[in-house]
Image (cartoon, rainbow, N blue to C red):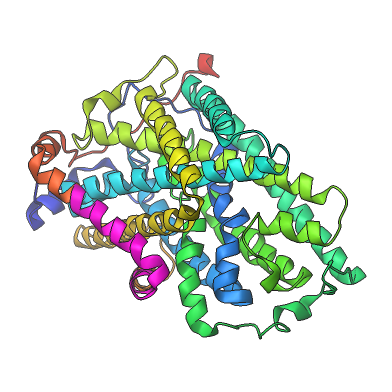
Amino acid sequence: MAHTPESSARLVAETPTARPGAVADAPADPGLHRGLSKRHIMFIALGTAIGTGLFYGSAGGIQTAGPGVILSFAIAGLAVFLVMRALGEMAMREPVSGSFAAYASRYLGPYAGYLTGWTFVFELAVVIVADTFAITKYMELWFPAVPAWAWVAATIVVIGLINLIHVGNFGEVEFWLSLIKVLAIVAMIFGGVILMFLGAQADDGTTAGLHNLWSHGGFLPMGFAGVIAALTIVTFSFGGIETLGVAAGEAKDPEEALPKAINTVPVRILLFYVGTMVVIMSLMSWQSIDGSASPFVQIFDKLGVPFAPHLLNFVVLTAAVSAINACIYASGRLLYAMAQDGQAPRAFTRVNRGGVPWLSVAVMLVVMVLGAILITVNGDLFGVVAGVASFAVILTWAMILLSHLTMRRRMTAAGEPVPSFAMPGGVLGTAFGLLFVAVVAVGMAVNPESRQALLIGLAWTAVLTLAWFVTGVRTSAAVHDRTGVLPTVPPRDASEH
């Protein structure tokens, strides 16, 4: 339904979050449980930021921009931080499981929430497909004779058991999986620095050192155009980090957990993305990275470091499982909230005894199967899959930023002060985020290799729009639209811990 200026002002005035810095005291949702601690929230933020995009997909970014991909990660990292601060500011006011889809519905209208929610679910589905494909590639190192479908089946069983029992189980598993990734990356960076000081040599005679960043065609061998072109691939690496906003709806103490998790984003990006890229491309020529395996495994293998390739293969495998785990969690919670808003089938509101929306989890497990079959039949589709995910990411980010901008305008109209956990730079920060989205979109349009992914994304948007008008979703969303106080999930009883 459309919001007039008068109704918009009334919504702000009627919302309990009108007091500065407060978290919404909304009607309880009896389905989901608040089972995520501060420790879980922190590592969910880590888990969704470190996955196949970094460990496997970064090879494409290196091939596109050479060492210049370091700049691509830094630019995208700044955009990620701004998006997360915008989302965090909204989540601090209303920590709901519907997260940015619910915020888009409230501030931009039901269609925007519908488009944002389904596009994010689409993004997560595509990321799950990419991670599933990566798992089959990783396992080839150890078991080349075992068919890919066997690893897909094993992954489905493990992920299904984790996500169908209780949200606390998801948080605990994600904590340990993310901890493995973090410790491994830190160890790899230190190990790489040591190899540089020792002057280790690769099997092609290249000596490890920072000089490799500019000795093979310069730091920007493809020019700044290569940096822009790599943004499409790099953006895929950050896909799913918005899960932190979804997790806010099930956080026990969102007012304390969210700011800490979001404010660590710059440090994580500098360490896990920029830091690892500097080390990786300092160890040997960037031209030797061919994308046949994870760049991390490939480089340490060529350097002849004992057991390192196998150890790193275990780490990247863990990263892929962790990313799938987080994506399935987020998609389930989002579909649950959208179904309550009439933007998805009501069947997605069904939960089991553990408060888990089991149907959406089952649907995503089926997506794993279909996606794995598709990519196994045509292994060259990984690049297209990554590009489609990037489209979904920038559309989701654009909606988050636009929702935040509209929220700020309503706050100003209602005479509310700027909250303590506010977007850095205010409107300018939001503008930079939207500029980044536009640059990536234009880059996808002019680059022949990513244009197909852009067209697929636009077709997805067209299908969603058609469904909005034809299937009755528009009417259902108007009936169930939560335009007043958005509900939060209730806290768990002490007996549930």
* Residue 412 sits above or below residue 325 on the image: below
User: Is the stretch drawn in magenta largely helix, strand or loop?
Assistant: helix
Q: Residue 462, image x and y in percent? A: 19, 54
Q: Quadrant of residue 444?
A: bottom left
Percent of width and height locating residue 467 = 15, 43
Look at 61% across and 60% down and name the residue there: 291
Q: Is residue 129 left or right of residue 114?
A: right
Q: From the viewer's perspective, tell me whether residue 249 is left or right of residue 179.
A: left
Please say if 67 is above or below 328.
below
Q: x, y (%) of residue 244?
A: 47, 45
Residue pictured at 71% horizontal, 57% vertical: 296
363 above or below 259? above
Quadrant where the image shows the C terminus? top right
> Depth check: 288 or 122 in front?
288
Q: Is residue 96 magenta?
A: no
Q: Examine the rendered structure and indicate whether residue 126 appears above or below residue 161.
A: below
Where residue 469 sits in the image (x, y, percent)?
9, 45
Q: Residue at x 86, y 65 (%)?
A: 195
Residue 214, picture quadrant: bottom right
The residue lying toward the viewer, choosing from 427 and 130, is 130
Left or right: 332, with 157 as reference point: left
Quadrant hosting residue 38: top right
Q: Is residue 449 magenta?
A: yes
The one of 405 and 454 positioned closer to us in this rendering: 454
- Give the residues drawn in magenta, as a range: 440-463
Q: Residue at x 62, y 62 (%)?
A: 273
Question: Is residue 1 shown left or right of residue 70?
Answer: left
Q: Is residue 155 visible?
A: yes
